[in-house]
Image (tube, grey):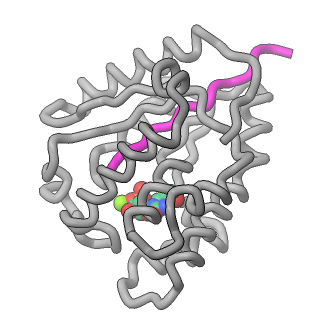
Amino acid sequence: MGPRGRLILIEGLDRTGKSTQAELLACELGSNSVLLKFPDRTTPVGQLIDDYLKNRHNPLPDQAIHLLFSANRWEAARRIESALFAGKHVILDRYVYSGAAYSCAKNVPGMDMKWCLDPERGLIKPDFTIFFMNNGHESEQRAGFGDERYETVQFQDRVKHTFLELFETWENASYRENNMRFLNVANKSITEVALEVKQIAEKCIRQGQDEILRF
Ligand code: TMP
Ligand code: MG
């Protein structure tokens, strides 16, 4: 059996170019890679999520939509694991950190970070996480900003702080140092960012790591 593939996550705020870069990286790695975007809106659970995001008056309680986002990841868990063991690299466009940061940023009583992270326990953890940052309000100038729930400047500010708190307080120092990179994408071209992402991914693939990490 050959070496297992690497699980590489691209995370960040809305409209920072994550999907574009995840696609470019998957293209770069070719047929030896699989790209998965969360939420995966194609599954039955994903359709409920899509409906919620597009319809600001959807009455689903915050707890219920949080658990659906998590269920949407669990739906894909076996697929991810088999791909990795088949030697394929799996590129993720958002994952557990988005799940915790967006829900926790809503400040719903009882939905603290621990509550938000609990349903994610046991999911495979990325071998490497690249977190896309920008300087502040560039996202709102991107085409389409504001179309979906959560795309308001105020909420995005809260999400950004919650992401940072999540990495600083709830992620372990060794993961932060060895398995993560914060990448400022502000004022960078798609090509520039793609090159950095490619270099990070190639390093992660070269280094290798046998055991699967878990949340
Ligand atoms: P997308 O724009 O990347 O398709 O994501 C849709 C929205 O869903 C985005 O605002 C982030 C949010 N989200 C959550 O709230 N929880 C999650 O678990 C995920 C994956 C995304
Ligand atoms: Mg979006």
Q: In this rendering, is residue 138 above or below 104?
A: above
Residue 70 position in % (x across, y down): 62, 61
Q: Kindly identify the residue that appears in the image at 57 percent across and 46 percent down.
A: 36
Q: Looking at the image, how many numbered discs can be counted on the residues?
A: 0
Residue 152 position in % (x across, y down): 23, 68
Q: Is residue 201 left or right of residue 189?
A: right
Task: Judge whether residue 206 can be spotted in this image.
Answer: yes
Could you say which quadrant of the image residue 213 lies in?
top right
Q: Is residue 3 left or right of residue 147?
A: right
Residue 182 position in % (x across, y down): 34, 30
Q: In this rendering, is residue 76 above or below 204?
A: below
Q: Is residue 57 left or right of residue 140?
A: right
For the C terminus, the image quarter is top right
Q: Kindly identify the residue that appears in the image at 58 percent across and 15 percent down.
A: 205
User: Farthest residue in the top direction?
Assistant: 206
Residue 138 position in % (x across, y down): 14, 49
Could you say which quadrant of the image residue 143 lies in?
bottom left
Q: Kindly identify the residue that appears in the image at 52 percent across and 37 percent down.
A: 171
Task: Judge whether residue 33 can be spotted in this image.
Answer: no
Q: Kindly identify the residue that appears in the image at 32 percent across and 20 percent down.
A: 195
For the N terminus, the image quarter is top right
Residue in front for this viewpoint, 176 or 67? 176
Q: Is residue 32 left or right of residue 154?
A: right
Asked whether 160 falls inside the magenta stretch, the response is no
Please report the bounds of the magenta region as a residue range: 1-13
Ligand 2 location (quadrant): bottom left
Q: In this rendering, is residue 33 above or below 72?
A: above
Residue in front for this viewpoint, 16 or 103? 103
Residue in front for this viewpoint, 37 or 123? 123
Asked whether 3 falls inside the magenta stretch, the response is yes
